[in-house]
Structure formats: structure tokens, C-alpha cells
Amino acid sequence: MKENEKIKIFIADNSEETTSNIVEYFENNDFCTITDTSKDGKEALEKLVKEPVDVLITDIVLSGIDGFVLIESLKEKLGNKMPKIIVTSSLSHEGFINKALSLGASYFMIKPYEMENLENRINDVLGLKTSTQEKVLQKDYKTMRTKIVEEKISNVFITVGIPAHIKGYQFLREAIKMAIDTPDIINSITKRLYPSIAEKFETSASKVERAIRHAIEVAWNRGKIENINSLFGLKVYNQNEKPTNGEFIALVADKMLMEGLGS
């Protein structure tokens, strides 16, 4: 299947209602298209041989030949060009399920079923993720990454001696997170970084700048220079050399990025 090409689906089902429901569900789908349908197993076989598809959704009970014979005939005629097969049926006997799977079906779905579940199974047999699954995964990853980044930054602040109760703590943490997500923002501290933080915390850019400066001064006045140098793995500063806001933000952000915490 080529990139951006829709998944081709054929429906072989004796129930007009089921077929109609599937067609309606996938009618405006961006990824799948129903190429054709049939109640008759023989007709379905002829159409599928003539125009192969990616996925066949078939019931067991069909006119002409049943779903099992349809699958066996397709294997003979198409070989490795066989579509992925999902068997759907109200016949839920274990023997039917085992036979369908032994013939090469990827899934057996018992009727009635939710259309969303059918879509998920189609994506499963083709090794794809559904848009819903993708969104959940992205959300979970983003939440987990944010939590890890915030914990790492908090540990850095504890090590260098920046107390959590001062205003600059929150501003500085936000600044570092922004520098991790958008590294080039460090080159536009006055025009982009401070105003963005100010907007989020409903204050002014100048107050953000002063509060961050104060937080860094507190750390240096506590005399934990050895901790700071140890944290970054080299002698960065001495007691009389305080970094600028931008230098400190960039230093911590770079450390996080080197630890693989980039977006």
C-alpha cells in the first residue's frame, strides 16, 4: 500500500443492515474506502480476484458459497496477494472461530459489534494505529515527559540552592522548559521568552526578568558553587562569577537536552 493511499475494504455480508452500517461509518473516512460489497460468496470471489483489496470483512453465512469457502478459494487464486481477513458472524461457536483463524483470518468478531471496534481491528491487521490510539499515546508521552522534565529541573534547583517559595523559582522553571522545547528562544530572551512567561503568569516581562535574576543571586549567595560545578560536570563558575539569566537557563536546558529530554 502506497503512502497516503486509502485502505481498500471489501464487504461480503448477507445482511443489508450490517453492510449499510459499515459503508455509512467509513463513508467520510480519510484512511479507508469501501471498494465494493456483496451478499453472494461467488460474486465476492470474482470481484476480489479481479480487483484485490487490503482488507476483506466477511460473514460466514453468504449466498452461493459461505465465508469459509470464500477464504479458501481466495488463498488458491491470490496466494500471497491475499487481503487481510476479518470474519464477522453471530455464529459464535468455538469451532467456527477456530476454523476461521486456521484458514487465515486475522480476527473473528461476534455480531453485533461497535463500528469503532471494527475500525480498530482493521488498523490492527494492517499494523497501523488508529487516530484515537495515536492521540492517547501522544498525550501519555507528553504527560510523562513533562513530569520527568519538571522533576529534573526541581532537582537542579535543590542542588544549586534555589528555594521553591520565591517567585523566580516558577519563572525560571518555565523558562528552562521553554528553552528545552524551543532551543532558539534563548536567543530572544527579551522579545520572546520573558513576554511569554509574563503572559502565562499574568505579570510583566520586567518582573519576570528581575525575579529570575533574584533566584540566581540567591543560589550564588548560598555559596553552593561546588554543587553547581559538580552538577554540570565541569568548573563553570566561581563565587564571584554569577551567570546571566540567559546563561543559566541555557546551561540547565542543555543539560536536559543531553539527557534526552527534548521534545
Image (cartoon, grey):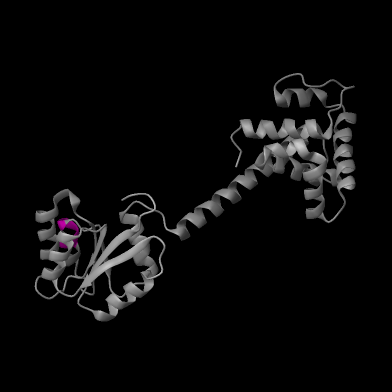
Q: Nearer the viewer, residue 132 or 53?
A: 53
* Picture residue at 50% right of the left edge, 53% below the top: 137
- On the question of residue 37 being in view, the answer is yes
- On the question of residue 88 being in view, the answer is no
The C terminus: image quadrant: top right
* Picture residue at 27% right of the left edge, 75% below the top: 19
Residue furthest toward the bottom? Answer: 17
**In the displayed structure image, the side of residue 47 where residue 240 appears, left or right:** right
Q: Is residue 96 above or below residue 170?
A: below
**In the displayed structure image, the side of residue 214 where residue 70 appears, left or right:** left
How many badges with numbers are in the image?
A: 0
The x and y percentages for residue 148 are 63, 43
102 magenta-colored:
yes
**In the displayed structure image, the side of residue 119 where residue 98 appears, left or right:** left
The x and y percentages for residue 226 are 79, 22
* Picture residue at 36% right of the left edge, 64% below the top: 119
Q: Is residue 85 above or below residue 155?
A: below
The x and y percentages for residue 176 are 73, 40
Q: Nearer the viewer, residue 93 or 260?
A: 260
* Picture residue at 84% right of the left edge, 43% below the top: 168
Residues drawn in magenta: 98-103
Q: Nearer the viewer, residue 123 or 185?
A: 185
Q: Quadrant of residue 89?
A: bottom left
The x and y percentages for residue 47 are 16, 65
**In the displayed structure image, the side of residue 115 where residue 224 appears, left or right:** right
- Secondary structure of the magenta portion, mostly? helix
Q: Quadrant of residue 51?
A: bottom left
166 magenta-colored:
no
